[in-house]
Image: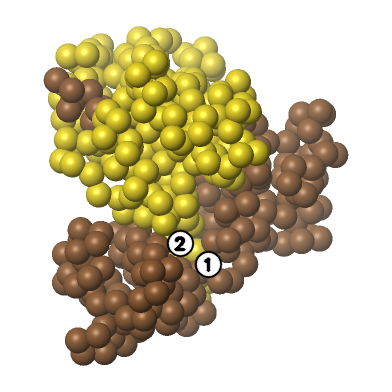
Chain colours: A yellow, B brown
């Protein structure tokens, strides 16, 4: 875990997956080495920035030839946490929650959803993509059987804070918040906001702006 | 459209949906007015920031009582583009693409996916959630029948740039990029990056950092 202990700036963490996907493409094209200059050109980010970002992952480049592609991929995947499997529980099996349960891509990036919770009697007792759906009241019990660090929040906004409080009380250390609601948590709890609707709003605004 | 023509800062655009969901909660609780101080306390954002953000949406608050809740909701929904219906096409009906087709929540926030494209013969000719799936080669033809501004990119990274180029050539003005690949587009094209995997990486890193 120590290699991941630096407080890496968020913009760097958001760019590293770009370098990873670029390196995978290079590998598929049969390339053995890639330089930060090449990466820079291909994804249109300043070469000094690329080199600085990659300095966090502690991979040594070789003069002139650059980074070994396979090593870069494996070091980046490791650094980004995609090679460890992080277990999570999901709260709220509505349209978006159900969609995330079906998205097997998450598994490839290190996230395994082991259980989901809802109160809808049509859903409780069923499963999606092999993931069992329990009644929300069973959360504490299930946490004892299969403790997880991550809770995925896909409930309606009117219960978002309440469910967050229950998650935290039950031992969840990080909340992946897909609701457009700003949840409050104790300082030591990680919150990752991923509101598709907030992203939509930004896109709509930029689109209208460009069209005038 | 004029009301949306200001180049609103992205952080403001990302916070506005928080105020909207807060106002909806207040409405559900039977409140008629809400002040920026109340919003500030409830979602833990500086009151001056709330007032400044809301100044972009041009809603007048009344001294002491604040904003009328119903008016605030309708002005925010309108401003954020959630009341207009924006048509989109989706490219790549894999795990995540299929999940987005099934997410009816997008429709409530102003996005209607009218068609999807893939090359998988098992998918072409079928539909998901009422949305027809066509062969990718049919894109130009379908754009003529039902032109859209927005393309949703959920393809594998090795074809992400190629499909983006085709979208742009076909008349797409904004790309909602769910891939972890950094796509390049002409200056006038809007790109909204929403990589779930980049968000996962940030969350994993923060979680490890807190646990040491």
Residue A50's quadrant in the figure? top left
Q: Which residue does the image show at 39% across and 23% down from the upper left?
A: A141
Residue B174 relative to residue A80: left or right: right
The CA span between labels 2 and 1 is: 7 Å
Instruction: Name the foreground residue: A147 vs B21.
Output: A147
Q: Are marks 2 and 1 in contact (CB under 8 Å)?
A: yes
Q: Is residue B32 above or below residue A55?
A: below
Residue B51's quadrant in the figure? bottom left
Describe the element under mark 1 as helix, strand or loop: loop
User: Pointer 2: what residue?
Assistant: A201
Q: Which residue does the image show at 42% across and 82% down from the upper left?
A: B71
Instruction: Assess disc 2: are there few (<14), some (14-19) or many (≥20) residues with their C-alpha within 10 Å of its C-alpha.
Output: many
- Indicate the chain on which mark 2 is placed: A
Residue B25: tell me if it is visible: yes
Instruction: Name the foreground residue: B188 vs A38.
Output: B188
Which residue occupies the extreme right position in the image?
B125
Residue A199: tell me if it is visible: no
Numbered label attached to residue B82: 1
Give the quarter of the figure containing the N terminus of chain A: top left
Q: Position of residue A11 (x, y in %)?
A: 26, 40
Q: Position of residue B47 (x, y in %)?
A: 17, 69
Instruction: Name the foreground residue: A15 vs B185.
Output: A15
Eye-nearest disc, 2 or 1:
1
Residue B43 relative to residue A105: left or right: left
Q: Position of residue A152 (x, y in %)?
A: 41, 36
Instruction: Name the foreground residue: A16 vs A175.
Output: A175
Residue A209 relative to residue A55: left or right: right
Numbered label attached to residue A54: none
Describe the element under mark 2 as helix, strand or loop: helix
Q: Position of residue B91 (x, y in %)?
A: 65, 42
Q: Which residue does the image show at 16% across and 64% down from the upper left?
A: B46
């Amino acid at each position: 875990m120590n290699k991941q202990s630096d407080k890496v700036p968020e913009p760097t963490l958001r760019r590293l997956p770009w370098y990873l996907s670029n390196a995978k493409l290079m590998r598929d094209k049969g390339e053995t080495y890639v330089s930060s200059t090449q990466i820079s050109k291909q994804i249109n980010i300043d070469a000094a920035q690329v080199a600085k970002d990659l300095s966090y992952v502690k991979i040594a480049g070789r003069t002139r030839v650059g980074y070994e592609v396979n090593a870069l991929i494996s070091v980046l995947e490791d650094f980004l946490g995609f090679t460890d499997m992080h277990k999570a529980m999901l709260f709220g099996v509505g349209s978006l929650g159900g969609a995330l349960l079906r998205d097997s891509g998450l598994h490839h990036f290190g996230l395994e959803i082991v259980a989901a919770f809802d109160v809808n009697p049509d859903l409780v007792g069923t499963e999606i993509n092999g993931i069992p759906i329990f009644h929300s009241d069973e959360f504490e019990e299930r946490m004892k059987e299969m403790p997880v660090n991550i809770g995925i929040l896909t409930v309606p906004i009117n219960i978002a804070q309440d469910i967050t409080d229950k998650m935290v009380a039950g031992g969840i250390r990080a909340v992946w918040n897909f609701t457009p609601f700003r949840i409050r948590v104790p300082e030591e709890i990680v919150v990752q906001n991923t509101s598709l609707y907030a992203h939509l709003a930004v896109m709509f605004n930029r689109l209208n702006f460009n069209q005038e």
